[in-house]
Image (cartoon, rainbow, N blue to C red):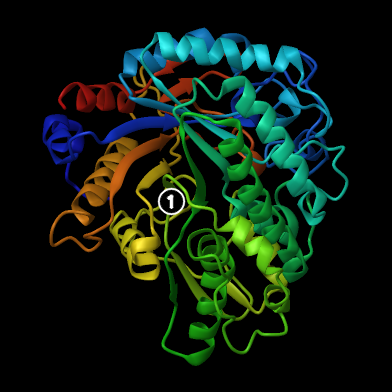
Amino acid sequence: MTDNQWRHRPAELAALLPAGFTMGVSTSAFQIEGGTQEGGRGVSTWDAFNHQKGRILDGSTADVATDHYHRYPEDVALLRDLGVDSYRFSLSWPRIQPAGRGPANRAGVAFYDRLLDELLAAGIRPMATLYHWDTPIELAGGWLNRDTAYRFAEYTFLAAEAFGDRVDSWITINEPASVTLSGYALGVHAPGETLLFDALPAAHHQLLGHGLAVGALRDAGVTGGVGIANVHSPVEPAGDGEEDAAYAALFDFVHNRIFADPVLLGRYPEVPEPFEELLSVFSEIDPDDLRTIGAPLDFYGLNYYFPTRVAAGAGGSASPDGTAQAMGSLPFHLAEWPEFARSGFGWPVAPEYLGVTLRELRERYGDALPPVVITEGGASYPDAVSTDGSFDDRARIEYLGDHLAAAASAVLAGGVAEGVELRGYHVWSLLDNFEWAAGYSQRFGLVHVDFATQDRTPKASFRWLQRVLESR
């Protein structure tokens, strides 16, 4: 963490943001909505997963989460008070299409109708994510099954017909890398498969689903822009040896390149040596699939949290979501970044690597890179209560200030990512929420949530961001 003390300089930070730069916040349905058995909602793989013993760090579930399903007017009022331009939320696939096929659930559509109307009445532009990990459980095999891509396109068309006149921006899939690696390869997320490199068909099927969804949105005539949200982490070898370099290239391939190259270039990247056999699935792809996946986008969503350092050999420290432990059987591990402070999740706080990420996007994709929107960025920190009952989360303020400044500076003339058209930044997250395998142990919110009472209390970071937005 730097000592810039952005908490005292909101107007100075506001002045760094380009004219027309969109500022927003993000959430996802499963993490905040609750109401998992109301309104005709179906069961998702995450519903089943978070009820399995030992899956969630604190033994919790998202059955109630932050009760957004019932409290959305209060949450939209918070957004209006904050002064954001955009709210990125996700539509729950099992709430709209309970079995993952068939007609739309009227009660589910009605819930999002009400949410959208509240947002528009508050002057907030809706950014809707179609898939943020809650796969209907009745879709056998999930993303390992190619048919799920076609079911996703069918669901997308239903959502587009219902909301296409009111959504400002559409995101097809959020972080297909996380779904593939955490859900199908390592088993720390739903559906809990531990297939390691045999999980890679799930990556291709998600990308195919993305491409088919883009077509469904276009066919439905939606008025909003269309994109995807990929999580990128710049990767470096831990040492100078050939093994570290080889495994770093492998990690970059399976975390970054296979999710961006097909979308932006219409092809998978060349498989790094000596991993041709391990990654042979990518040498047998139907060209028609690639044409579908590479459909033109209006924007590219970037989720950035931290860089990755890779070292040969098993090892690595424990992590709250179990990722490091689940990687124990692999011949490489994620190494530490002792030069950086760490968030509550143990992630390195490295705002300069956001500029590196933007530079890599420009270098790898050039004119094929559409305008970029940072669709997630934020950090978890423990919330210390002050004597007056407020939450002075100054570490989050400095984190956000540093990352916003790094992003804005990177794309200026002479910046490390000059030439990238950066259109906005969405903070993760509006509310403390159910943080997947970490349960309620990690707080990312600008708003503190007492999970016992569901009381919401804006933190110091909320009031600081409010001042930044007022200063523009």
The residue tagged with tag 1: helix, strand or loop? loop
Q: Is residue 359 above or below residue 375?
A: below
Q: In the picture provided, is 366 more to the left or to the right than 28?
A: left
- The quarter of the picture where residue 285 lies is bottom right
Q: Is residue 251 above or below residue 153?
A: below
- The quarter of the picture where residue 63 lies is top right
* Residue 5 position within the rendered picture, expressed as x and y whole percent measured from the top left: 18, 39
In which quadrant of the rendered image does the C terminus lie?
top left
Q: Is residue 39 above or below residue 129?
A: above
Q: In the picture provided, is 94 more to the left or to the right than 435?
A: right
The residue carrying mark 1 is 305
Q: Residue at x 60, y 61 (%)?
A: 291
Q: Can residue 233 be seen in this view?
A: yes
Q: How packed is label 1: few (under 14 Cα within 10 Å), some, or many (20 or more)?
A: many
For the image, the number of numbered tags is 1
Q: In the picture provided, is 273 more to the left or to the right than 309?
A: right
Q: Give amino acid for label 1.
A: Tyr
* Residue 16 position within the rendered picture, expressed as x and y whole percent measured from the top left: 15, 41
Q: Residue at x 51, y 74 (%)?
A: 310
* Residue 75 position within the rendered picture, expressed as x and y whole percent measured from the top left: 48, 14
Q: Can residue 389 be seen in this view?
A: no
Q: Which residue is drawn at 62% across and 9% down?
A: 70
Q: Which residue is drawn at 28% across and 50% down?
A: 421
* Residue 103 position within the rendered picture, expressed as x and y whole percent measured from the top left: 80, 24
Q: In the picture provided, is 426 more to the left or to the right than 322?
A: left
